[in-house]
Image: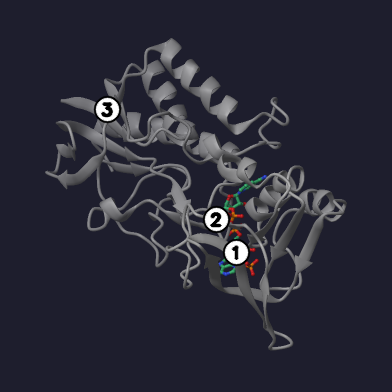
Amino acid sequence: MKDLIIIGSGPAGLTAGIYAERAKMDTIVIERNYMSGGQIIDTYEVDNYPGLPGINGFDLAQKMREHADKLGVNFVNAEVKRVEDLGDVKRIYTDKEVYEAKAVLFTSGAGHSKLGIPGEDTYGGKGVSYCATCDGAFYRGKDVAVIGGGNVAVEDAIFLARGSRKVYVVHRRDELRAIKSLQEQLFAMDNIEMVWDSVATEIVGNDGKTSGVRVHNKKTGTDKVLPVDGVFVAVGIVPNTELFKGICAMDDRGYIIAGEDGKTNTPGFFVAGDARTKQVRQVATAVGDGASVVSSIDRYLTTGEW
Ligand code: NAP
């Protein structure tokens, strides 16, 4: 039996792995992806992680993984299928093996929200994308649309505008949610057109490929189709916590309820990173969570107190 099983290997899971290794806990980190890093793998530029301005997300993930490897953190590539609470023992069923531990840390992060409109699934991978850095190169010299007004939407639009002919940013309000410095960069680009107060209502296509996105202007009540080859959806994130339902309490959006100490309402289960209820979801806060939760886990393993 292990002391600790960490589920997920984004910045929170990798940091917790490093701290747990240094605390001499017998730990494994279970990751389902072919590589560590979580959401930052797809981030072109991380510009607010102290000490590494402008680093590519993929490179930052690699550095964190190399750090963990150097210290001897034990990684297992498998997909968790079920989590069982047997009191002092926690059992984790994966698609490969069953593992047991005294404590479990959820660092399963979050994934992309969908729009839920007609055509989104039909044209998924055929013009509809949730990752500008992965798919942007297919739209060099073409017209594309980004849906959303947060940091990710604005970063995606800036990234796409460097290669695409024209980028529409479709936002449901008349003000962006993204931080001001990103907004300034966005508004300085002359091939970006803002489509304010508008919601995407349908992805339209031709010959099995995306040919446009229908948008509805909420203020004027008018509809139009923006003729684009690619639609990049950036309307927020949803926590990857489905597996942990029934194990620990969550809020109405599916985030696991816990404070900075990462303690859930169920003894022996901890959470860190984007899957936790918190105000700011960034690499720096995920790393902070990963570090602080290990001291709570250490206390639990040593005293058994919750
Ligand atoms: P986000 O900040 O939640 O923004 C989502 C955007 O999509 C908002 O503008 C929202 O509109 C819009 N939206 C939501 N549902 C929609 C719908 N059904 N139809 C149309 N528009 C919709 O999410 P995010 O940009 O994906 O970022 C995720 C998290 O990562 C955030 O916590 C973000 O701060 C963080 N992040 C930080 C950085 C950074 O610090 N540089 C970079 C990337 C990500 P409203 O504005 O009207 O609500």
Badge 3 is on which residue?
302
Looking at the picture, tell me which residue is in the foreground, 168 or 237.
168
Q: Amino acid at mark 1?
A: Ser
Please indicate whether residue 134 sits to the left or right of residue 12 in the image. Answer: right
Q: Secondary structure at mark 2?
A: loop
Read off the residue under disc 1.
211
The x and y percentages for residue 245 are: 26, 57
Q: Amino acid at mark 2?
A: Gly
Queried on whether the Cβ of the residue with tag 3 lies below 8 angstroms from ligand 1, the answer reads: no
* Image location (x, y in percent) of residue 249: 31, 58
- In terms of sequence position, does the residue under pointer 3 or pointer 2 come before the other? 2
Name the residue type under label 3: Thr
Q: Is residue 109 above or below residue 225?
A: above
Task: Answer with the quadrant where ligand 1 appears in the image.
Answer: bottom right
Instruction: Find residue 302 and report its image quarter.
Output: top left
Rendered view: 108 above or below 192:
above
Quadrant into which the C terminus falls: top left
Observer able to see residue 75: yes
Rounded to the nearest angstrom, the CA distance separating label 1 from label 2 is 8 Å
Residue beneath disc 2: 127
Q: Image point 66% across, 49% down: which residue?
A: 156
Q: Which one is in front, 11 or 78? A: 78
Q: Of helix, strand and loop, which one carries label 1?
A: strand
- Which of the two labelled residues, at mark 1 and mark 2, occupies the earlier sequence position? 2
Considering only vertical position in the picture, is 115 above or below 143?
Answer: below
Q: Quadrant of residue 44?
A: top right
Q: Report the residue that reaches farthest toward the front.
A: 207
